Amino acid sequence: MAGEIPDLHAEIRTGTGKGAARQARRDGMVPGIVYGGGVDPIAINIPFNALLTRLKKGRFLSTLFNLKVEGQEDVRVICRNVQRDVVKDLPTHLDLMRLRRTSRINLFIHVTFINHEAAPGLKRGGVLTVVRPEVELEVLAGDIPDHVTVDLTGRQIGDVIHIGDIQLPEGAKPTIQRNFVIANISAPSGLRSEDNAEDAAEE
């Protein structure tokens, strides 16, 4: 099941139009709108500093949030647009979309590696090189996996692990169609040096 979904705190914006939005910005808030989910849109304000912190963490547009507004039920939302000041590149408005549990969305999911001790390649001194510590998956909003698991049992030096080798959670599928690389087990530097020396001797 899903890991902890981050909270996004907001308040109802009183008044509509550009005047109310400008006042919100003067008050250190970023105006926004919440729409979708089969109910009427609501106008909100989000604290500027809190939003800027979230934006700096990256992947804001592909992160699912638990929107908390006083007097309203919590709702899961995903940001569909952030308008920015053309000069300062700071957020001036955002659009949030409510999600039903049956909605399908694209999210980055963490990759966890298990059974290192059962990988002969690692026992021989091989090095696990993680190419993608997280993968973008299309998942159900009501059933978001906390992570995907890569079992290293039996993996040898030289093995390459692709997305197709992983048992994905039910209902999840990669957003990229090709069978991309997740990780590989490479030879230790000492072993690579010996191999290179042998190749040179053969030549």
Image (cartoon, rainbow, N blue to C red):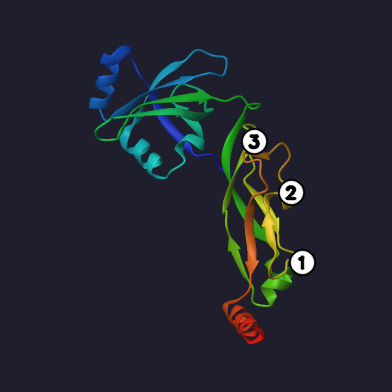
Within 10 Å of the Cα at label 2, are there few (<14), some (14-19), or many (20+) other Cα atoms? Answer: few
x, y percentage for residue 89? 29, 35
x, y percentage for residue 115? 71, 64
Q: Relative to the observer, which residue lies in front, 195 or 180? A: 195
Q: Which one is earlier in the sequence, the residue at label 1 or at label 3?
A: 3
On residue 45, the disc is: none
Residues at badges 3 and 2 in contact (C-beta under 8 Å)? Answer: no
The amino acid type found where label 1 is placed reads: Gly
The amino acid type found where label 2 is placed reads: Gln
Spatial CA span between label 2 and label 1: 16 Å
Q: Which one is earlier in the sequence, the residue at label 2 or at label 1?
A: 1
In this rendering, which labeled residue sits more in front, label 1 or label 3?
1
Q: Which residue is mark 1?
A: 154
Q: Relative to the observer, which residue lies in front, 66 or 144? A: 144
Within 10 Å of the Cα at label 1, are there few (<14), some (14-19), or many (20+) other Cα atoms? Answer: some
| Mark 3 element type | strand
Residues at badges 2 and 1 in contact (C-beta under 8 Å)? Answer: no
In which quadrant is the N terminus drawn? Answer: top right
x, y percentage for residue 137? 62, 40
| Mark 1 element type | loop
Is 178 located above or below residue 111 in the figure? above
The amino acid type found where label 3 is placed reads: Val
Spatial CA span between label 1 and label 3: 29 Å
Q: Residue 136 vs residue 53: left or right?
A: right
Q: Residue at x 25, y 35 (%)?
A: 88
Query: Does residue 63 show up?
Result: no
On residue 167, the disc is: 2
